Amino acid sequence: MAKKFGKFLMFTAVAGAAAAGVYYYLQNKNSSYSDDLDDDDFDDFGDDLDNDTEKGDSKRNYVDLHLEKAETAASDAVDHLSDAAAAAADTAKTVVKDTVKDAVETAESKVEEFFDDDNDNSI
């Protein structure tokens, strides 16, 4: 029942979309889109830029670059990042070492229990 209702619903959606498309086409088939573009007044802003540069009145403020400050800031950042990376590597090494050690101990105990159980049953 639900499968038939789903098919019916899909059919009505497709039929509605097709009907809306046909209606839109019939309403707009006689209108001309090219006439609308000819009436628009497009401004050319390139002329305004040429007039500003010809005057020679430059109101820009320039900022001096201090390369020494930039170099020291960059080297400080690199030092900080290398220290943080070394600390993270040490922490990861410790965590991995402890995890592997626990896994090995657990595996050894499970293997030992398996073989001990096997020997007890054979006697």
Image: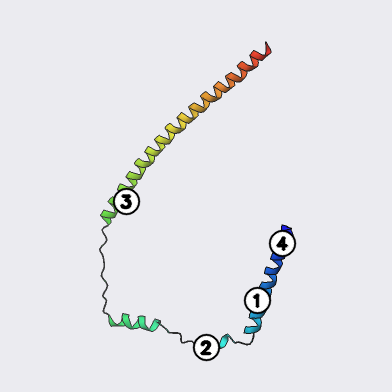
Identify the secondary structure beneath mark 4. Answer: helix
* C-alpha span from label 4 to label 3: 67 Å
Q: Earlier in the sequence, mark 3 or mark 2?
A: 2
| Residue type pointed to by label 1 | Ala
Report if the CB atoms under discs 1 and 3 are less than 8 Å apart.
no
Task: Report the quarter where the N terminus lies.
Answer: bottom right
Q: Which residue is mark 2?
A: 38
Report if the CB atoms under discs 2 and 1 are less than 8 Å apart.
no
Up/down of 60 relative to 91, above or below: below
Identify the secondary structure beneath mark 2. Answer: helix
Q: Report x, y in % for residue 40.
A: 48, 87
Q: Earlier in the sequence, mark 2 or mark 1?
A: 1
Q: Which residue is mark 4?
A: 5
Identify the secondary structure beneath mark 1. Answer: helix
Residue at image point 54% right, 87% down: 36
* C-alpha span from label 1 to label 3: 62 Å
Q: Which residue is mark 1?
A: 20
Estimate how packed mark 3 is, as few (under 14), some (14 to 19) or many (20 or more) residues with alpha carbons within 10 Å.
Answer: few
| Residue type pointed to by label 2 | Asp
Up/down of 6 relative to 108, above or below: below
* C-alpha span from label 1 to label 4: 22 Å
Residue 74's disc is: 3
Q: Nearer the viewer, mark 4 or mark 2?
A: 4
Q: Earlier in the sequence, mark 1 or mark 4?
A: 4
Identify the secondary structure beneath mark 3. Answer: helix
